[in-house]
Amino acid sequence: MSQQIFGTNGVRGIVNDGMTIQLAMDLGRAIGTYMSGQVVIGNDPRTSADMIKSAVSCGLMSTGVEVIDIGMVPTPVVQFYVKENALSGGIVITASHNPPEFNGIKCVDADGTEMPRHKEEQIEKIYFEKSFKSQAWNSVGTLHRATRAVEPYLRNVMSLVDTKTIHDADLHAVLDCANGAGSVTAPILLDDLNVKAVTLNSNPQGTFPGHPSEPVEAHLQDLISLVKSSDADLGIAHDGDADRTIFVDDRGRYLYGDCSLAIVAEYMVRENDGGIVVTPVSSSMAVEDAVRRAGGEIIYTRVGSPVVARKMIETGAIFGGEENGGLIFPLHQYCRDGAMTVAKLLEIVAIEGPLSKLVDNVPKYCQDKRKMACPDSRKESVLTKLVEYYCDERVDTTDGVKIWFKSGWTLIRPSGTEPLFRIYSEAQTDKDAQKYSDNCQKVLESLLE
C-alpha cells in the first residue's frame, strides 16, 4: 500500500506538531512539481495562515511555479479564481471546521474542483520520494499578490438567482460567519441582495473567539436566540472557510444540513422539470423522498464533496450536496459553495414563503449523530469485523459500513481528518435513532477492546 498524506479534505494537522513548515514547504515542492505553471493560493484567517502559506509558496516557487496570492478568502473563491483564470490549479490554506490549533493544505484542480484522489496520489508519490523539480536561480517562480478576487465571484453568484425577487422581498437575516473567511463575502452578498442583516462573529479572527468554527447547534445558540428575538426571516451560519452553510428558520429552529439539502434539491428538480441529484450515503432519507416527490432521480456516493462533484459531472446532475451543509450548484462551479447556497435559499424563501413552512414540508425523520475515538491504525480492521458482526442485516459498504434496520439505518465511517469514527443514525423516532447509535457504538467499543 502506497504512503498517504492526504485525508478526505486535504492535509491537516496541529501547527508545529504534524503540520510543520518543513511538511508545508515539501508539499509545496511536490504540488509545484506536479502542477507547474500558475497556481493561486488563498487562506482562511487562522493565526498560522501566513506561516503555512509562506512555506507552501516557497516550495512552489522553487519548482518554477508563478504563485498568485489572493489573501484571506473563502475556499470557493479560490476555486472560482482557478476556473475563471484558467490556471494550473490552486491551494487553500485551511482546516475548515477544525479547532484553531489546526491548519491544512487543500489542492484545487485546474477545473476548479477539489483535487481527485488519483491526482493526490501522484503528488504523494513525489512528496515521499522527494523527486522534486528544482529550478536554476534564474528560473525560479515569483509571487504576485492579487486583490479583488471576491467581486467577480459574487457577481457570478448574483447572476444565477432571481435578484429582483429577493430584493423586493425585504428579508431580514442574522448572519454568523464564525470569525472565518465568510466575513469578507457574506455581508457584502446580503447587502447587494437588499437583505437587512444583523451580524455575529463577522470579523475575521484566527482564534475563533465567538465560537468553534463547526456550525453545529451547540455552537450557534447566540444565532438562534437573536433570530427569535429580532423576528428575522432566517439565520445564516458559515463554517471557518465558508464552503458550507447552515440555517436557522424564522421560528428559531436549527436546520440540519439534510433539511436545507432537501429543500433546495426539491426546488432545483422542480425548476428543471426533473433531473439527477447526487448525495452521499450519509444523507437523510428525507432528501431522496423530496427529490422523488418533485420527479427527480437520486444517486448515492461515498462521503466527500470531490466524489459528489465528479459523479455530478459524470451524470450531468442538476444539483448535489452533503448532509453537512455543503451544497453544489453546477451552473456556478462543481464544489461546495456557502455564498451560492445562501443566495439560492434566499430566492426560495422570497418566492415560496417563510422558511418554517418549507421546513414543515420536508419529510420527517429523526437523526442521531455522534463521534467515537478510534486510532487510525485500527479503523480498517474494526470495520471489517463490523461487517461480520452484522452479517444478518442488509449492509452497504459504499463508504464505511451502513446497516439497514427495520425502520432506519446506522452509518459508521472513519473520519479522513481525525482519529475517530462518525456515527450517523436515522429512524422514524428519536428513540429508535438513539437506540441504533447506542447499539452500534457498544459493538464498536467491544471490537476496539
Image (tube, rainbow, N blue to C red):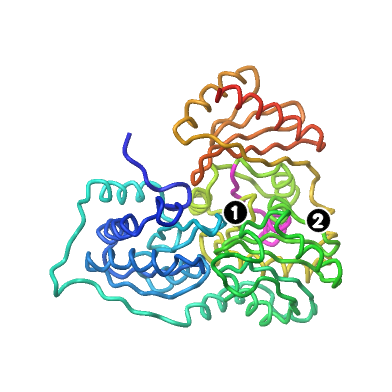
Q: What residue did someone put label 2 on?
A: 359
Residue type of the residue flagged with mark 1: Gly
Residue at 28%, 61% in the rendered image: 32
Secondary structure category for the residue under label 2: helix
- Residue 114 vs 287, above or below: the answer is below
Quadrant of the rendered image containing residue 337 = bottom right
Residue at 72%, 30% in the rendered image: 436
Stretch of the chain drawn in magenta: 263-280
Q: Nearer the viewer, mark 1 or mark 2?
A: 2
Residue at 56%, 19% in the rendered image: 388
Q: Residues within 10 Å of mark 2 (few under 14, many from 20)?
A: some
Q: What residue did someone put label 1 on?
A: 320
Quadrant assignment for the N terminus: top left
Q: Residues within 10 Å of mark 1 (few under 14, many from 20)?
A: many
| CA gap, disc 1 and disc 2 | 19 Å
- The answer to which of 273 and 402 lies nearer the viewer is 402
Secondary structure category for the residue under label 1: strand
Instruction: Indicate the position of residue 266 as horizontal and vertical percent values.
Output: 72, 55
Residue type of the residue flagged with mark 2: Val
